[in-house]
Amino acid sequence: MRTIRPLLLCVILLFSCTPAYEAQAETVEICCDSGPVELHLLGPASSGTMSPFDAELNAESEEVTISDAIAQQQEIAVWKINPAWSGTYPSSTWEFSIEYEVANAGGAQINASVSVEISGETFIGTTDQSNSFLPAGSGKLSIDINVEAGSIPSSTEISVTLLAQTVVFSVPGTDAGLTFNWGGVDDDSTIMADIPIVDLLIDEPTSEGMDVYVSMVVASPFGQMTAAHANSLELRVNNGVVTGDPIETSSGQFVRLTWTWRAVVEGEQNITVEGSIQVQSGTPTLSGSTEFTISTFDDGNDGGGTFYPTEEPLRTDGGGSPLIVNMELNLNNTMQDGDQYLTLERTIELTVDEEIAYWMRWGMDNIGNEDPSLTTSLRIFNSGMVSEDDRRNRVIDDVEKSEFENQMVNLAVTYMNEGMALELEELIGNDVMNLEKISFSVDLLGEDKVTPHPLTLTIKTEEILGGNNLTTLVRNFVIVQPSPIWSGIDLKIMIETGIMASLTGASIGGDDSLEFTHRRTPFGESIEINAQNLEPGATFSFTAMPTNNPLNAPLSLTLITLGILAGGFWFAMRLTKKKRRSALWIEMVLIPVVLLTLYLAYPPFTVGVIAATAVTMWIITAIASPRRKGLAVDKIETTFPIIECPACSTPNPITTDERPFRMPCSGCGRVLKIVE
C-alpha cells in the first residue's frame, strides 16, 4: 500500500504537467465530387494557366505564330493547374478548342495533338480528316481527348500541351502565317474537362442568443476567385436559404463565409445545414449537407445580429467592392502680405461598401489592437484614448472614430496604399508633405455597428500651387491587386476657379469612357469629369496650367474680349455712317461665335485670335460698303450745278464745263453722262 501511494502521486503529478488543449470545433466536409467544367486558357505560351472563371480573361490576347511550314513536332503552348485539386475523376472526353487565324494563304494543313497529363498518366488527342485543314481567316481548332478514370493525389498538377507535328500552307503568299490566340476577351480558348475543383466544408455553428453563426469554407485551387465568381453559392438551414451577405475571413489559402441564421425556438435542437455551389452556368450544382446540434436561448434581442470575427476580415471576396469617388476642387487667387498665391482646396469623398467597408469598420473597432497577425495597415494605429471597454465591443464609438481620424493625418499613406489599394498621393495630386493642411473624417452613414454597411471617408486638403506650369492635378489612383479590392469606380470630379484664377489648357487623357467638360464665365471656370463603372486598371491623367495671369483669368479675359468686340463694332459703325450696313449686320453673327469660344473655355490665345479676326472682317466690310440711296449731302457753298442720279437720287455737283462729260455717281457709282 505504501508503495502504491507514491506511484499514484507520481502519475497524478505527471498528468498535471501535461499541457491541456482546447477542443477544436467540428468541421465537416460535405462536398464535392468531380464535375464538368470549362477551363479558360490563360497566360504566356511557356507558363500558361487554366481557370474556370472568364473574369480572368485579359483585354489583350496571347498568341503564337507559325510563319514557316514545319515537318517535325513543335510545342505551341502549355497550360497547367498547379497544384490541382485532389480527388477522383471519371472517364470522359475532354474537348480542347483554340482560336486561330490563317493569313496570306488559302489555308493550312495541320497535324496537331493535345496532350493531357494527370498524376503521371498521359492522354493524347489528335487531328483527323475532319479538322486537319484550317481555312483562311479566323476560326477554331477543336481536338477531343479521351481521358480514362483515375485519381489526383495532393500537390500534383494537370498539364495540357498543344503540339504541332506538321504544318503546310496552301497557296501561300508573302508572310503567310498560322496564329493561335488565347487568354483574351475576344479570343476565348478553352478545354472542357471533368475534374474536382472545389470542396465545401461546414464548421460547427456557434450560438449567441437566438442568432446562430454558420460558417462554410470554400476550398479550391483557385482561392478567393471560386467564392467570388461562382455562378451560385448558397447556404441553407433546415431547407431555407440563409439570406444576407456573409462575413468573409481567411481560412488558410481559402475563404470562410459566415452567415447569421435566426432560430425560431429556444433550447437544444438539431439543424440541417446544406451548402451548394454552381461554378459555371450550365454545369451541375454541387451540394452536400450535414446535421449539428445547437442550443439557443432568448436574450431579449430582436435579432439582426452580425457575426463578429476574432481574426481580421478579408478586404475582398475576390471580385472586389464598388467605389464611389466625388471630388470638389476650388482654385483661387489669394492675396497675403502683398503677394498673390494660387491656392487649391480639395474635398474628396470616398464611399465604400461590402467587404472593404466591413474591414474598415472592424479595424476602427480594433484600433490599438497589437495582435501580430493583423496586417500592417491596422497594426500601425495606437490605442490613444481608446479604452479596453471601447475596443471590440462591436460598435464604433466616438472615441474610436476620433482617434482614427486624427491618426490618419500621419498614417494615411500606409493605410490607404496597403490596406485600401488606393495611392493617396495620386488621389490628392501631390506629396502629403507639400500640403498646407490635410484632414480626414468618417461618416458612418447612420450605422455605428460593425456590420457590412457603407461608409464615407472624406479627405480635405489645401495647397499652394506654382503658377504658369503644366501640372497633373489628378491621376489614376487605384493600385491593381491580384485579388482586386475594387470591382468598379464611379468617378465625379467638379472643379471651380475664382474670377482671377484659371486652369488654362485643361485636358484629360487616358481611358475613353471619361467624360470631360470645361466652361468659362466672367465669374470663373468650371470643369466636370465623369466616369461610370470605371475599370480599376484604367489609366487617366488630368493636367492643366494653373495661372492668375490677367490675360487668362476669366473676368479679365472676358472684359478684354468684350472690349475688343465693342471697339471693333464702334469703329465699323463710324465707317458706315453714310453707307449701307446690311452686310455688316449679317457679320454681327460673329459676336455669339466669339462669346461661345469664350464660354467653351478655348485657350485665351485662340479666343483673342477669333475676336481679332471678327473685328478685322467688320472693318473690311465697312470700308467696302456703298453709300446709302437718297442720303442728303451737306450743303455745299458753290456755284456749280447739281444733278440728281436717276438710279439712287444722290445729288452730284458738276465741276467742269466740258461737254459731253462722264462722271461716277458719288452714291451708287453708276456712270453719269452730261451732254449739256
Image: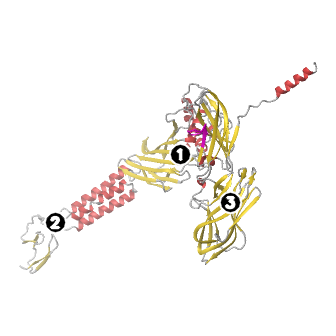
User: Quick one: SS at disc 2?
Assistant: loop
Q: Residue furthest top?
A: 2
Using the numbered discs, state the Cα–Cα distance from disc 3 to disc 2 in whole angstroms.
96 Å
Q: Position of residue 39 (x, y in %)?
A: 64, 56
Q: Position of residue 251 (x, y in %)?
A: 68, 41
Q: Which residues are the magenta region?
A: 234-247
Q: What's under tag 2, amino acid-wise?
A: Arg
Q: Is residue 473 visible?
A: no
User: Quick one: SS at disc 1?
Assistant: strand
451 or 90, which is in the foreground?
A: 90
Find disc 1 in the rendering and name its residue.
322
Q: Position of residue 390 (x, y in %)?
A: 59, 28
Find disc 3 in the rendering and name its residue.
93
Position of residue 289 relative to residue 265, above or below, is: below
Image quadrant in which the C terminus is located: bottom left
Which numbered dot is residue 628?
2
* Residue in the image at 45% along x and 53% along y: 515
